[in-house]
Image (tube, rainbow, N blue to C red):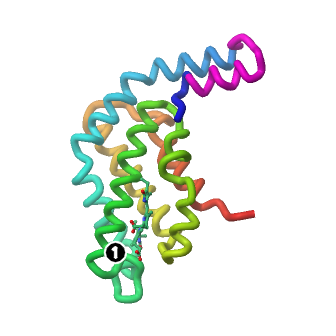
Amino acid sequence: MRDAVTSLIKNYDGLGRYLDRDAIDNLKSYFESGTARVQAAGAINANAASLVKQAASRLFAELPELIRPSGNAYTTRRYAACLRDMDYYLRYATYALVAGNTDVLDERVLQGLRETYNSLGVPIGPTVVGIQILKDLVKDKVVEAGITPGAWLDKPFDHMCRELSEQDI
Ligand SMILES: CCC1=C(C)/C(=C/C2=NC(=C\c3[nH]c(/C=C4\NC(=O)[C@H](C)[C@H]4CC)c(C)c3CCC(=O)O)/C(CCC(=O)O)=C2C)NC1=O
């Protein structure tokens, strides 16, 4: 598992190169956004349960077929599994925010997830919608907390959506 700094160093060390302009710019933006990223993680942590609950009710309002008898989130057990998954996405997004890197998502969340979902019939499209709703709610919460959101806030959520949606070649 890597953060922005260790991942940069690993790349440059692999090439046997000193940190160049790009690397320095990268590091600058990592450090400059540091306080905001940590504060955003704090605002998410303090509101995690309600963010997940709100995101789920918005998802089920948009896609009510999920909780109908033929839906994948139908039955108390599967409904709870769906909310638990949303909670995983939110919690791991906070780790990625703090790390300034999506490596933790690849390693701990996304690895093998699509295969698991496919074998259980968990629909990927609606899961992606759920993650996008989480992102929107998080953005509102962060703004409410007086933090200016940047591209860094979208990154972990967009990364999970993109990786989940990707088709097998
Ligand atoms: C920390 C990393 C991590 C992730 C991400 C994770 C996901 C994950 N979600 C699962 C199930 C599930 N996931 C869902 C989720 C949904 N169904 C829907 O219709 C919605 C679109 C969606 C919620 C947004 C459901 C309903 C199940 C249970 C499926 C079943 O058992 O039939 C399973 C199968 C095993 C289990 O039920 O626990 C895994 C491994 N587990 C992990 O350890």
- Mark 1: few, some, or many residues within 10 Å (few <14, many ≥20)? some
Indicate the secondary structure of the residue bearing disc 1: helix
Q: In the image, residue 75 lies at what x, y percent?
A: 30, 81
**Residue at image coords 50%, 73%:** 123
Q: Is residue 59 left or right of residue 47?
A: right
Q: Nearer the viewer, residue 31 or 103?
A: 103
**60 to the left or right of 1:** left
Q: Is 30 situated above or below 92? A: above
- In this picture, which residue range is highlighted in magenta? 6-20
- Name the side, left or right, on which 108 lies relative to 134: right
Q: Amino acid at mark 1?
A: Arg
**Image x and y of residue 16, in percent:** 76, 16
Q: Which residue is mark 1?
A: 78
Q: Nearer the viewer, residue 153 or 27?
A: 27
| Residue 89 pos. (x, y %) | 41, 52
Residue at image location 31% in from the left, 29% down from the top: 39
Q: Is residue 64 above or below residue 29?
A: below
Question: Residue 37: where, in percent of width, then height?
Answer: 39, 30
**Mark 1 near ligand 1 (CB under 8 Å)?**
yes
